[in-house]
Image (cartoon, grey):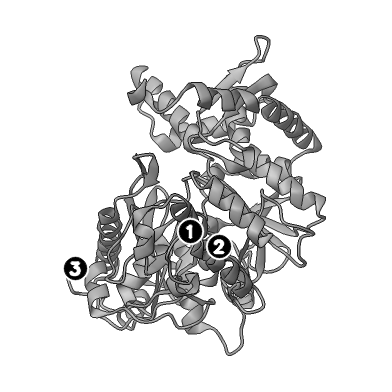
């Protein structure tokens, strides 16, 4: 589409905006009716450990959203010579799970507790037993029930619980709703009704009533919506929150807010049965759309849903690339001391490609990438660690391969359970920073799961693009057209991507690496026991 036609699309409101609040970056993306990127904006942010809780300053939510939108709108004006006054539809996405409680006046009652917090073990264990359903540490209901168990003062004042995406959508539209995919990370979903499981709600209310004076949970949770349903319109106040200049008008339709898992599935065309995707960044998670139920609950596997409510087996790990990024910064600093001006991307690309020269079992080197706790590995507190035997083959290639494979190690333990259940994966798609060095992340991921891994050219667009696709689907879908059909036939008809398959030697080497990784895990647990607190407490 040339610039004149793009200008017309912008002025006629035939564009779709997706915004995602990720763990390290808030990103806004505007697409046209052909799902091509028109403009984009971004804002970097980071979580903080405050009083033992991983959180974000909520003021930064709005600073970041406004900065993203300002950059995006500026690009529109610069590239197409027109102001962004209206949009065809908007979709909001954000990190799933966590805890955002509000009172009846809309006042926030506790600091935002992100998915990264693992201090809810007692609640998660008790609820999992009560429901006969795996309830992970990071789910919203775990945080709420843990607050009840601890007798936290705010719990009896709670009138509304939501996720980060649900919070932003609420402030922009005035509606307390949530997409079913994001809702499935708050409380279990009944896939027959695409709503919260009523039997489990009753069990929760009975258990909670014995410990605190709280309202029925159903009254506290958002209304659940499926992809394509009406989720309200941008209000006057909401438009000013997003664009304080007043240029953007009210009344823009908004699709159900979704979690990063749902927009990841959408952005990789993996909402159909027997498809899956891996999102690898600060955290890493894999999702496989099931064609039949699993034989029983597993503590390593979460049952969530696609944005249109299909059951999904999800393996979620809190830690992925943070340790890789930290080492890359050390190497970049060394390069600078040596007189070489290298960008972060250049250093990361060099190290990723170097890893492919390493031995498949990493030569006896072991890395633990645990910046925070990791429930699947039974790690309550993380301590990043690199260890080796005196006779390990200590080379740069093996060093980097150990770090890249450790980023997948915990995920692999969960995916191996799905293999034991004979779950069929016809296509696995990768997206996120781990897959940016072409072919590297794909090959190592393929070695971990022993299946081909695809990375589409569009995968780098990420969750903001996925949110924009959900917004477009709401407006452009044909009567009765499913989300999977819309994506396959309208968005991805000509862009499946090229698969990468690891060699048998890669897979066998990864298995040897995993065996050493698991065998030495007690060292990681002992480190957390002996190294209490942070450096400020030493």
Residue 242 relative to residue 405: left or right: left
Residue 85 relative to residue 123: left or right: left
- Residue 281 at x, y percent in the picture: 50, 46
Among numbered discs 3 and 1, the one appearing first in the sequence: 1
Q: Are marks 3 and 1 in contact (CB under 8 Å)?
A: no
Among numbered discs 3 and 2, the one appearing first in the sequence: 2
Q: Are marks 3 and 2 in contact (CB under 8 Å)?
A: no
Return the residue at label 2: 207
* Distance between the alpha carbons at the discs numbered 3 and 1: 44 Å
Residue located at (35% from left, 81% from top): 233
Return the residue at label 1: 211
* Distance between the alpha carbons at the discs numbered 1 and 2: 7 Å
Return the residue at label 3: 244
With respect to residue 366, does 116 lie above or below? below
* Distance between the alpha carbons at the discs numbered 3 and 2: 45 Å
User: How many C-alpha atoms fall within 10 Å of the one at disc 3: few (<14), some, or many (≥20)?
Assistant: some
Please tell me in which quadrant of the rendered image residue 270 appears. Answer: bottom right
Please tell me in which quadrant of the rendered image residue 375 appears. Answer: top right
Which residue is situated farthest in the top direction here?
390
Q: Which of 318/405 is in front? A: 318
Please tell me in which quadrant of the rendered image residue 450 appears. Answer: top right
Which residue is situated farthest in the bottom direction here?
479
Q: Are marks 1 and 2 in contact (CB under 8 Å)?
A: yes
Say which of marks 3 and 1 sits in front.
Answer: 1
With respect to residue 44, does 18 lie above or below? below
């Amino acid at each position: 589409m040339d610039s004149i036609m793009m200008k017309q699309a912008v002025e006629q409101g035939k564009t779709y905006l997706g915004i995602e609040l990720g763990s390290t970056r808030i990103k806004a993306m505007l697409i046209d009716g052909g799902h091509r990127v028109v403009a984009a904006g971004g804002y970097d942010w980071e979580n903080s450990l405050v009083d033992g809780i991983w959180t974000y300053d909520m003021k930064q939510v709005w600073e970041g959203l406004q900065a993203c939108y300002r950059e995006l709108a500026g690009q529109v004006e610069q590239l197409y010579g027109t102001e962004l006054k209206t949009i065809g539809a908007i979709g909001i996405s954000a990190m799933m799970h966590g805890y955002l409680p509000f009172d009846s006046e809309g006042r926030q009652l506790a600091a935002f507790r992100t998915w990264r917090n693992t201090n809810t073990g007692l609640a998660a264990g008790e609820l999992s037993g009560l429901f006969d359903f795996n309830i992970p540490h990071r789910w919203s209901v775990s945080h709420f029930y843990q607050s009840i168990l601890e007798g936290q003062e705010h719990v009896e004042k709670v009138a509304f619980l939501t996720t980060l995406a649900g919070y932003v959508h609420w402030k922009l539209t005035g509606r307390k709703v949530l997409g079913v995919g994001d809702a499935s990370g708050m409380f279990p979903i009944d896939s027959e009704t695409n709503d919260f499981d009523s039997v489990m709600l009753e069990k929760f209310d009975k258990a909670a009533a014995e410990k605190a004076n709280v309202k029925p949970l159903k009254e506290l949770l958002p209304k659940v919506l499926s992809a394509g349903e009406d989720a309200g319109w941008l209000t006057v106040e909401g438009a000013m929150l997003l664009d304080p200049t007043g240029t953007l008008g009210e009344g823009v339709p908004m699709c159900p807010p979704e979690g990063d898992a749902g927009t990841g599935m959408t952005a990789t065309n993996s909402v159909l049965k027997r498809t899956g995707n891996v999102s690898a960044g600060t955290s890493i998670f894999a999702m496989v759309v099931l064609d039949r139920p699993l034989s029983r609950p597993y503590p390593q596997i979460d049952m969530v849903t696609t944005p249109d409510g299909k059951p999904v087996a999800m393996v979620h790990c809190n830690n992925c690339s943070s340790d890789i990024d930290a080492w890359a910064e050390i190497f970049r600093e060394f390069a600078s001391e040596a007189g070489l001006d290298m960008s972060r991307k250049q250093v990361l690309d060099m190290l990723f490609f170097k890893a492919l020269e390493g031995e498949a079992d990493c030569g006896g080197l072991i890395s633990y990438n645990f910046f925070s706790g990791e429930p699947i590995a039974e790690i309550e507190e993380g301590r990043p660690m690199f260890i080796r035997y005196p006779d390990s083959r200590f080379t740069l290639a093996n060093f980097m391969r150990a770090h890249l494979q450790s980023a997948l190690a915990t995920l692999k333990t969960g995916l191996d359970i799905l293999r034991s259940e004979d779950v069929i994966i016809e296509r696995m798609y990768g997206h996120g920073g781990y897959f940016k060095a072409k072919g590297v992340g794909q090959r190592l991921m393929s070695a971990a799961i022993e299946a081909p891994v695809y990375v589409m050219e569009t995968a780098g667009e990420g969750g903001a693009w996925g949110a924009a696709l959900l917004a477009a689907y709401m407006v452009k879908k044909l009567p009765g057209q499913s989300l999977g059909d819309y994506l396959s036939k309208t968005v991805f008809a000509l862009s499946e991507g090229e698969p990468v398959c690891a060699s048998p030697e890669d897979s066998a080497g990864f298995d040897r690496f995993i065996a050493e990784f698991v065998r030495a895990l007690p060292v990681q647990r002992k480190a957390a026991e002996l190294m209490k607190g942070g450096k400020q407490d030493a």
